[in-house]
Image: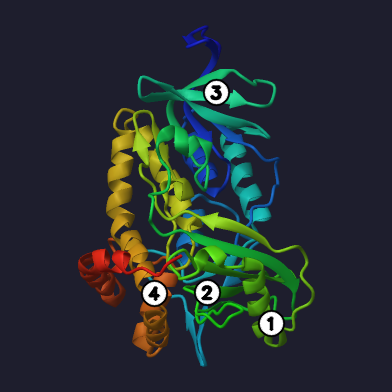
Amino acid sequence: MDFGAECGTVEVVEHVDIAVIGGGPAGAAAAIQAARQGAEVVVFEKAPHGRDKVCGDGLTPRAVGALNELKIDMGDAHQIRGLRMIAGRKVRELDWPTTDRFPDHGAVWPRRRLDAALIDAAVAAGADVRFETEAIPVIDDGRVTGVEVKGGPADGSTIAADLTIAATGAPGLVARMLGAERVEGETFGLAIRTYAETPRHADVYLEAMLSLKDEHGTAVPGYGWMFPAGDGTVNIGVGALSTMKGFKKLNLNKLIEMYRNVVDDDWQLGPNLERPRAWRLPMSTTRRHGPGWVAIGDAAGLVNPMNGEGIDYGLESGMLASDLFIENPVTASARYDQLVGERFDAFLRTGRRFSFLIGHPWILKTGLRLSVSTDAIANITLAVMGNLVDNTTPGAAGRVMWLADKSLALADPILRKTRAAA
């Protein structure tokens, strides 16, 4: 609505309850959840509808649970029964656990189709989604009061919003404006992927090779993956953590080619269907909320350092932000930060600390042998790789992560001080 107010020198031409910057899974989830509860929501997505996002395309049971909560039809996705973990010559194939919290299956759903399904659901819920349009926060005396539109027919106009949600992925301009950049010196990741045809495209297990090596034979803290898409293709990729020695010199194109050579015969791969494409994985942020705004998903650093996965956290954090706004717009921002912290901080903090530990090659080698050495330990590894661990996780996995958080807290200063040179 046009209520003729002014914001600085730019006329405010509209007012909404929530403005969302970014139309990926996190932003779309926030829009769906808010719009279905009657909120007036506008979403700004800089890409056109149906755009591709470089990603591994794997969905954990936790992500499937969130999509079910959002009532997203997953008939187009390839269902996954579990995870095949490879460490050296040891192979363990484990089904996702049956719990009362998450489904007993995951999925592979290429992002072009996943993101389209989510943003279409946001539109169907009543959200105003503006494609090929960017937005930046409007900050007035330390408070975000809405967004300034960049591009499209409303270019240069300001939309006032009671809550602005940053769902912008890896840190960029919006993060700099909000003071929500990556924590200097903290772990981050890089990954690269492509697609290839394979007769094993309908395999019901994700495959993760934990004993990844570069072209020099150096152990890499990360893993290589084969995620069968059920459509004739497999998503093949590798990811690495910034804590390894020589990380700045790591050649991702050579790394994925090395990995492809290892799995080529077993998967009977055809030629790459596209040029391998890389992306950055943020795993921390200096801030995830402030007056009038919150950051969700990757923009909030909600990425598991153990596997580079963050779609499930993006969906959950987006829904949580909207629910808290509907409950009480005044306290939503601070409550969001508190509840996200209670749910995820201990686990993600432990993962970041663990990444410094495995940045030491001899520790990484020992850890890989242990990770799949017995069924009990492999099931804990499965829970960690499946993002099934948080502050409410019962059983052995929950106890191990609690102990790891406490013990690594003591070791953290030493691990950082002795970290391998990048």
Name the residue that disc number 1 marks: 261
Q: Nearer the viewer, mark 4 or mark 3?
A: 4
Residue 196 lies left or right of residue 87; in this view the side is right
Q: Residue at x 70, y 76 (%)?
A: 201
Classify residue 401 by image quadrant.
bottom left
Q: Is residue 195 above or below residue 139?
A: below
Q: Residue at x 49, y 63 (%)?
A: 308
Q: Earlier in the sequence, mark 4 or mark 2?
A: 2
Q: Farthest residue to the front: give it.
A: 421
Q: Amino acid at mark 1?
A: Asn
Q: How far across and down, in percent of the image, does residue 362 sit?
A: 39, 83
Q: CA distance from mark 1 to mark 2?
A: 15 Å
| CB-based contact (under 8 Å), mark 4 and mark 3 | no
Q: Amino acid at mark 4?
A: Ile
Q: Residue at x 51, y 25 (%)?
A: 147
Q: How far across and down, in percent of the image, does residue 194 sit?
A: 69, 66
On residue 309, the disc is none
Q: Is residue 90 above or below residue 231?
A: below
Q: Residues within 10 Å of mark 4 (few under 14, many from 20)?
A: many
Name the residue that disc number 3 marks: 148
On residue 223, the disc is 2
Residue 74 lies left or right of residue 265; in this view the side is left
Q: Nearer the viewer, residue 40 or 305?
A: 305
